[in-house]
Amino acid sequence: MTLVLPDADATLDLGRRLAGLLRAGDLVVLTGGLGAGKTTLTRGLGEGLGVRGPVTSPTFVIARIHPSLVGGPELVHADAYRLGGIAELDDLDLDADLDDAVTVVEWGAGLAEGLAEDRLEITLVADPATEERTMDVQAAGPRWDGIAIEALLARGEGSER
């Protein structure tokens, strides 16, 4: 499924809607260049999950944990950009929090897929001439069988391609 998001607000809103599908144990792997909207999407996830913020880029701290303010799962937000490989990702012990949290790994393609069979893989591409972003969502694993991800995400701002 591919969505077109006209601006950062639409990306934030889509993150809020996506949070409604997520539960403890879910892994979201985000891919996209600098400025593609990975952290903006995660900020929306955090708002939708009702976690303590602010949700900001974890580039320099590698990982942040945002506890729930509403009794739901916490948000573990990691950035694999500066990691040298799977061994360094493993050193973060993200799998220790996986069952109790929603885990989001920015720059995680090629590294984070091994953390869980069930995951959402989201690729964001920004148009350098506008604020528009294209978002591709792929669900992996039986957790997502029968869940109408497309219907939920296509509602509201943005359009499906």
Image (cartoon, helix red, strand yellow):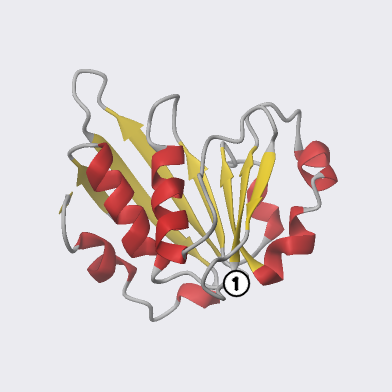
Going 79% across and 62% down the picture, which residue do you hit? Answer: 96
| Placement of 117 over or under 122, stated as above or below | below
In the image, residue 16 lies at what x, y percent?
35, 59
Q: What is the quadrant of the N terminus in the image? A: bottom left
- The image shows residue 103, relative to residue 60, as above or below, that is below
Residue 131 locus on image (x, y percent): 22, 29
Left or right of 118 in this view: 83: right
Q: Is residue 60 visible?
A: yes
- Which quadrant of the structure image shows residue 79? top right
Left or right position of 2 against 59: left
Q: Where residue 110 appears, x then y in whole percent?
A: 62, 41
Secondary structure under tag 1 reads: loop
Left or right: 16, with 90 as reference point: left
Relative to residue 121, is residue 82 depicted above or below? above
The residue positioned 46% from the left and 48% from the top of the image is: 42
Most extreme residue toward the top is: 129
Identify residue for label 1: 24
The residue under the point 44% across, 78% down is: 145
Amino acid identity at mark 1:
Ala
The foreground one among 55 and 85 is 55
- Quadrant of residue 33 within the rendered picture: top left
Residue drawn at x 73%, y 62% as measured from the top left: 97
Question: Which of the pair 63/154 is nearer the observer?
Answer: 63
- Is any atom of residue 161 visible in this view? no
Quarter occupied by residue 69: bottom right
Residue furthest to the bottom in view is 146
